[in-house]
Image (tube, rainbow, N blue to C red):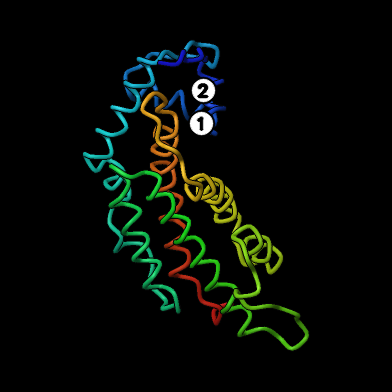
Amino acid sequence: MREMKKLNVAQFASELGLPAALLLEQLNAAGIAKKQGSDPMSEKDKAKLLEHLRRAHGADEPLKELGSSKEVVTPVKHKRQLKVDHYFSKVQKLLPEHPNESLNNMRKVVEAICKDILDETYEKKDEEKVLKPASAFTSLEDMTQELKRRKQLPVAIEKYLVVLQHYGNFGSHDQEPDQEDISSEISASIMAKSSLLPLKAMVDWYKAFDLSAQ
């Protein structure tokens, strides 16, 4: 068995690609008493955190936080809306046991939303504007930048999109399983759980998006 390197909370958060404050929050929720980034992280701490995350996801805790999906908006039908609903459902279903796949589907939700908004603004463009359809953009990063340029993203949605894009990038890269190193699953679990509320807000905004009202 290889020797595990010893890390403190801040170093472990950096390894996970997470803010230290978010990791501290999750550690304390798991009953692991840590107060600051310099506190040491043991392998026992990591195992207890992962056990807590699996148990919390299995109890559908993140789904309860989302509340009812019937409340907020009057849906506007978009070309890819059925795909968005399908992928969003998979995000929630896969989270308990397959957080990386959950993140992959989260990225698919965001990509489908961005493509619809790009196409709809392209189709309604003024003759003076030079716009391109979604098919002209090869990455989520390019689509995001173009939506910013077109000023179609509210400030809150733009902030959510930055977070979701970061988490989606993590999920889109295959994480090699390693029974001696549980960092990847911990990171994916925390990211997937943290993405649910921003993703729900983005889906609600998308369903309410209506160019004719602008």
> Which residue is disc 1 drawn over?
16
Left-right relation of 166 to 208: right
Q: Amino acid at mark 2?
A: Phe
> Which residue is disc 2 drawn over?
12
In terms of depth relative to the viewer, which is nearer, 155 or 160?
Answer: 160
Place residue 58 in its image quadrant: top left
* Distance between mark 1 and mark 2 Cα atoms: 6 Å
Residue 45 pos. (x, y %): 37, 16
Left-right relation of 190 to 10: left
Residue 143 pos. (x, y %): 63, 64
Mark 2 falls on what kind of element? helix
Place residue 144 in its image quadrant: bottom right
Q: Are marks 1 and 2 in contact (CB under 8 Å)?
A: yes
> What residue occupies the far front of the structure in this picture?
1
Residue at horizontal 44%, vertical 29%? 183
Crowd rating for badge 2 (residues with CA inside 10 Å; few <14, some 14–19, many 20+) = many
In terms of depth relative to the viewer, which is nearer, 40 or 128?
Answer: 40
The quadrant of the image that shows the N terminus is top left
In terms of depth relative to the viewer, which is nearer, 110 or 201?
Answer: 110
